[in-house]
Image: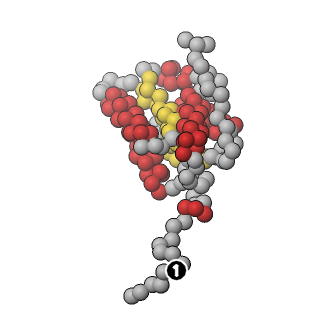
Amino acid sequence: MAGTEYTLPRATFDKPVKLLIVVAPFYRDIADNMIKGAVAEIEATGGTYDLVEVPGALEVPTTIGLAERLSNYDGYVALGCVIRGETTHYETVCNDSSRGITLLGLEGLCIGNGILTVESREQAEVRADPARMNKGAGAAAAALHLIALSRKWGGQSKGVGFVPTPDEYKLAGSTEDTPKA
């Protein structure tokens, strides 16, 4: 199918974006290639990123959910690789990690899903390679496009990184209120 895929133009931003790359590095070389692709795509848009590693693909959605509640990222890139084995564990990991990411996305999180689900190591190597299918960059591009859409439709509601914007500070009461005990 090479040559039949369509790629959207790279997302552009007026204000900087910060993403969290969450990677399950079970297959270290494959994960490293996907990280390279994702980082290159993020940096090409002028964005910044943090990177965390988790034990496996099942922990990726949980980590993204925690980061959304406890930090301040514009979007997320989920990276990992699941290669079919001899047991049904493959289906569990593929389905549940994908379902978790999809549910978070339906809650409004901007996530690019780059968890490879393949039949063989060779398939994973081709998909992870930045000079070939470059699925790490594809996942980052997906997250960046979702961030651009969310800003277009709803405006930016969070600052970049961990520092709140001035309008995010909410103080109880007003200056005219006199506290009473």
Write down the quadrant of residue 153 in the picture.
Answer: top right
Point out residue 102 in the picture as x, y percentages from the top left corner.
Answer: 41, 36
Return the residue at label 1: 176
Residue at the image point whose x is 42% and y is 43% from the top = 107
**In terms of depth relative to the viewer, which is nearer, 116 or 33?**
116
Tell me the SS state at disc 1.
loop
- Asked if residue 111 lies left or right of residue 144, the reply is left
- Colouring style: secondary structure
Q: Which quadrant, please, contains the C terminus?
A: bottom left
Q: How many marks?
A: 1
Q: Residue at x 62, y 46 (%)?
A: 17
**Front residue (pair 157, 45):** 157
Q: Is residue 102 left or right of residue 135?
A: left
Q: Is residue 134 visible?
A: yes
The residue lying at 61 percent from left, 13 percent from top is: 3
Q: State which quadrant residue 29 falls in.
A: top right
Q: Residue furthest front?
A: 176
* Image quadrant containing the N terminus: top right
Q: Is residue 33 visible?
A: no
Q: Residue at x 64, y 35 (%)?
A: 11
**Residue 16 percent across, percent down from the top left:** 66, 47
Q: Is residue 164 above or below residue 103?
A: below
